[in-house]
Amino acid sequence: MPKKNTVATLLAMKGQEKITQLTCYDYTTARLIDSAGINTILVGDSLGMTMQGYEDTLPVTMEEMILYGRSVCRGCKDAFVIMDMPFMSYQVSVEQAVANAGRLIKECCANAVKLEGGSQVCRQIEAITACGIPVCAHIGMTPQSVNAFGGFKVQGKGEDNARRVLEDALAVEKAGAFMVVLECIPPKLAALITKKTKMITIGIGGGAGCDGQVLVYQDMLAMGDFKPKFVKHFAQIGQQMKDAFQAYSQQVKDGSFPEEIHTYAKSDCSDAFLAQLDAEY
Ligand code: KIV
């Protein structure tokens, strides 16, 4: 019997059962993901790429996050919904971070917010959690820093960088985060962080040692051309959609769709009346 996932139920799963997470940006997909029993949904700012066609997540605004997030939340019964805070919605000041986190919760009915960064965003995490808003942190390869990284590159390589990523994890935990996304870091480092923290670790390119996994749903369904090393295709939905669109096009053009069963023929007036209408007009 599925039940609503909460911070408490998710934390109780650490070390007992793996936690599942998928991104989602719309109502229809949210209903499908929720009914499949996925524990948590992330309304990621990756929507800038998957839904809006940008090269990265940087252009996404608060208004756009709210628009997509509302639709997702309306489609969820049991999944715990986490909303990404978009670029520059939390970096400028702690006050602005709190106000924007509050908007995502109030205006979308989301359950938690996610923001990127380690020790540099701890003051924001402390202030947001002090308002009773659960926070998921995000460290390692943080896509909003793509320009600083010089591309979407693996982080935590080498001893100094590995230490820095571990220290970031411990810092966001101390600040109050209950969950942390570990993106594109080596698997033994991710497993060590998972061992060293009481937070739930969610890996994306972090290996199987994390408490849970997240994927962008269009990536795992092979709906786009993008396939990083950490993505597995669980179905070829992109090809199936393309085949269906082509079949539809062909059948409309050759007249084999719609058939009589797709019409309201029973509601038609008599041929005599239609002939009269034909003559009148
Ligand atoms: O925006 C997003 O979808 C994310 C995940 C890739 C973790 O941050």
Image: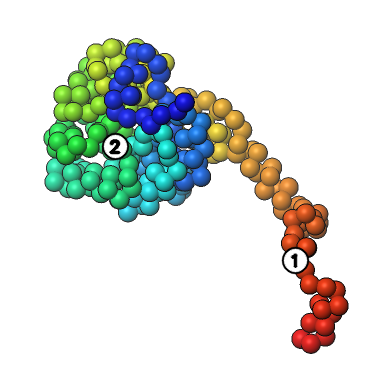
Q: Can residue 77 be seen in this view?
A: yes
Q: Does the residue at mark 1 contact the one at mark 2 (Cβ under 8 Å)?
A: no
Image-based side of 234 in relation to 165, left or right: right
Residue assigned mark 1: 267
Q: Which of 157 and 142 is in front in this view?
A: 142
Quarter of the figure that contains the C terminus: bottom right
Q: What residue type is labelled 2?
A: Ala
Image-based side of 19 in relation to 106, left or right: right
Above or below: residue 236 compared with residue 26: above
On residue 56, the disc is: none
Percent across and percent down for residue 196 are: 24, 13
Percent across and percent down for residue 152 are: 37, 32
Q: In which quarter of the image is residue 200?
A: top left
How is the model colour-coded? rainbow
Q: Nearer the viewer, residue 140 or 199?
A: 199
Percent across and percent down for residue 199 are: 26, 21
User: How crowded is the residue under tag 1: few (<14 C-alpha within 10 Å), some, or many (20+)?
Assistant: few
N-terminal label among 1 and 2: 2
Residue assigned mark 2: 112
Instruction: Judge: label 1 CB < 8 Å from ligand 1.
Output: no
Label 2's element? strand
Residue at 16 percent across and 28 percent down: it is 175
Residue at 47 percent across and 40 percent down: it is 30
Instruction: Judge: label 2 CB < 8 Å from ligand 1.
Output: no
